[in-house]
Image (cartoon, helix red, strand yellow):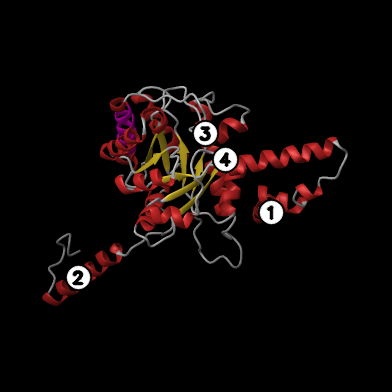
Amino acid sequence: LILQGAIKPSLCTAMLYTKLLSAAVALLAIDTSFSFGCPPPERLSRLLKATDSGEAPIILMPCCYDGITARLVAQSGFNATFMTGFGVSGANGYPDTQLVSFNEMVLAASKVAEGLSSAALENVKFGEPDYTGQSPVAIPCIADGDTGYGNAINVKRTVFGYARTGMAGMMIEDQVAPKRCGHVAGKAVIPFDEAVQRVKAACDARDEYEALFGKGTGPLILARTDSLVTDGFEDAIQRCIAFREAGCDMTFLEAPQTIEQMKEYCQRVTGPKLANMLEYGNTPILPPSELQQMGYTIAAYPLTLLSASIKTMQESLQLIKEGKPTLDKILPFAETKDVVGFTKYAKEEDRYKC
């Protein structure tokens, strides 16, 4: 009423109003770094800031590629994940050579997002007597945007496509299309200036999405360079620096071959940085604590889940072929049902019975 001018406040009333307003502003200013209900990009941004400031440990990021692997990562208590293009390609029976299309990747991202949200909801007891009002928290996921599936305009469409699925971020890289895994032979990268413009297009799309749908909704941009192998370490560093100047939120220098290169990258490039811990790849595998000491913010494990599942399936198939039992290789049926969601489904079914 005071604001509307309907009443003229006394001095005491005005002072009380001013104090209440100040208290409300102070309350809104309280750090909500890990508050519930914020958009996935905002949640990821807060995780990055907490790690970069030293308040939180390095973000361990096992990479998923479908609904079940997303659920497993979330159920295991990790704070974030990454949808790997290698994994999505492999699950579809292809090598990571961009044979999987943009639409197929967006569909995979939708399945990952659904897996993450279903896992989050399983920890909340909606409708049950001991429900405490706890909010579900779906962990944020960065999606592999490969080369953006075309020119700069395609890159922007890719960002929007992933944003609509609920992805917290998107990786964009500077390889020539069709791209390939960063640890295999035959890579080629686009020219320096073109690479910067590709990253800038992704950043512009992030900002445009946020302008349309609100603060914290635009997917964070992880800019990757593969130029170390093709153009040398110094070129890769300069690309990462230029990507930061173009507005990216995180950088990823792919396939450094020595600890010294990893340290120099962290020293010379600002902002959050991702270390790609590919077992049997070209980069030294280091403990998370050592990576954080160097200056890395994220430690990604791109193929651990895919490779582990392939190995177990191959061993199980061999046992079946030999007529031997597979019990040592599998979970009890009850655990399998729980992992895929039968337990939650049964509770929901009971909740809505007439």
Q: Is residue 202 above or below residue 39?
A: above
Precedes in sequence: disc 2 or disc 3: 2
Mark 2 crowd level (few <14, some 14–19, many ≥20, 10 Å Cα): some
Q: Are marks 2 and 4 in contact (CB under 8 Å)?
A: no
Of callouts 4 and 3, the N-terminal one: 3
Looking at the rendering, the stretch of residues picked out in magenta corresponds to 195-206
Location of residue 35 in the rendering, given as x and y in whole percent from the top left corner: 41, 59
For label 1, the SS is helix
The secondary structure type at the circle numbered 2 is helix
Residue type beneath disc 4: Tyr
List the residue tagged with mark 3: 85
Q: Nearer the viewer, residue 318 or 107?
A: 318
Compute the Cα span from label 4 to label 3. 18 Å
The answer to whether one can see residue 293 in this image is: yes
Give the mark toward the camera: 4 or 3: 4
Counting residues from the N terminus, which is met first, the one under dot 1 or under dot 2?
A: 2
Rendered location of residue 306, percent (x, y): 61, 40
User: Disc 1 marks which residue?
Assistant: 343
From mark 2 to mark 4, how far is it between C-alphas? 65 Å
Which badge, 2 or 4, is on the more N-terminal residue? 2
**Residue at image x 41%, y 60%?**
56
Check disc 4: other Cα within 10 Å, few if <14, some if 14-19, many if 20+.
few
Q: Which residue is mark 2?
A: 17
